[in-house]
Image (cartoon, rainbow, N blue to C red):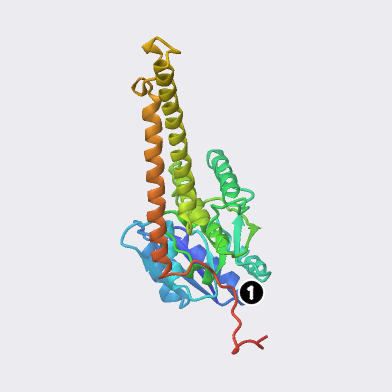
Amino acid sequence: MLSIVIPVYNEEGSLIQLHREICEVASAHDLEIEIIFVDDGSRDRSWEIIKTLVRDDARIRAIRFRRNFGKAAALNAGFEIAQGGLVMTMDADLQDNPQEIPEFLKMMETSLDVVSGWKQVRHDPWHKVFPSRCFNGMVSWLTGVKLHDHNCGMKMYRRQIFDEITLYGELHRFIPVLAAARGYSVGEKVVQHRPRTHGQSKYGFTRFIKGFLDLITVKFITGYGQRPQHLMGTFGLTSFGLGTLGLVVYATCWFLTRLLYYTGLIQDQASLFYLKDHPGTIFYVALMFLGAQLISVGIIAELFISYQNRRSKDYSVCETITPDNRNAG
């Protein structure tokens, strides 16, 4: 079965047509599907329309939030009840074309675990397209997951991925990155991006700020999630080392100038080195304290990770061979 998870937020004008197009594709290609609508606190008639669709089509399941919690929460709720071995995400605004579904399925048959859509030709204004391309390039560079369009809402996954990753905040756009960090294979497919005919965009300039902050989080999770001390300790030791080195240099100057003064090699007390006269003293002391704090935070994070690992796995199993399945095909 293919589970299609669709977050909905004020999309009353597109839901009936979207449902019809999905059903047409499923019928034409003999696909076993379930459609999961997640109403993320819509303020229009979206939920009434979804309830009507549920009555007419037994393949539809629906969830309604009490208020708007965001796309990541809506997707997470849909993933939790999805029953299919494959899960597809689509936006509800008709800009994603259901006719792409069979091609996604074909790509999944090539042993891929994630197929991400790429809106190569976009029908959006330039002030959205250009920053988005810059952001996608930065994500690919920092994470090593080379995708042209991390923000595309049309993606397909193997169901077991969501047993290992949890979405919160706005991490939904980074699911392929999180999956790749667990060892899952990620591919990309060019998809048609249709012009918006109903509703309005839910995203503004602030999504790039939030996206950048989430990118920092994802980079930390995927790179140092199980070894935070490697990051915090590196910065901490560097800071502590620089502070210590600076104070050692100052202490050496203080000692040498007094040695020279008491041996008579210098006569003027003004030539003596006084720590209080140099603002660098406070700077180097601050570096030492900062370094010690970073190392302490790293130790606390390591203790937290150690506790969490007692309750959850920090690895992903692809296959297991036991005496019971040794000769299985």
Q: Quadrant of the N terminus?
A: bottom right
Q: Secondary structure at mark 1?
A: loop
Could you tell whether 174 is left or right of 77 in the image? Answer: right
Residue 322 versus residue 47 in the image, above or below: below
Visible residue check, residue 158? yes
**In front here: 140 or 232?**
232
Residue 7 at x, y percent in the picture: 44, 61
Q: Residues within 10 Å of mark 1 (few under 14, many from 20)?
A: few
Q: Nearer the viewer, residue 271 or 67?
A: 271
Residue 187 in percent (x, y) is at 64, 60
Q: Nearer the viewer, residue 264 or 12?
A: 264
Q: Is residue 173 visible?
A: no
- Nearer the observer, 38 or 210: 210
What is the three-letter code of the residue carrying label 1? His
- In the image: residue 26, left or right of residue 53: right
- In this view, 38 is above or below 275: below
- Assign the C terminus to one quadrant of the image: bottom right
Q: Residue at x 46, y 53 (%)?
A: 229
Seen from this angle, which residue lies furthest left? 66
Place of residue 115 in the rendered image (x, y in percent of width and height, measured from the top left): 61, 62
Q: Which residue is mark 1?
A: 29
Q: Residue at x 52, y 72 (%)?
A: 160
Q: Residue at x 36, y 24 (%)?
A: 275
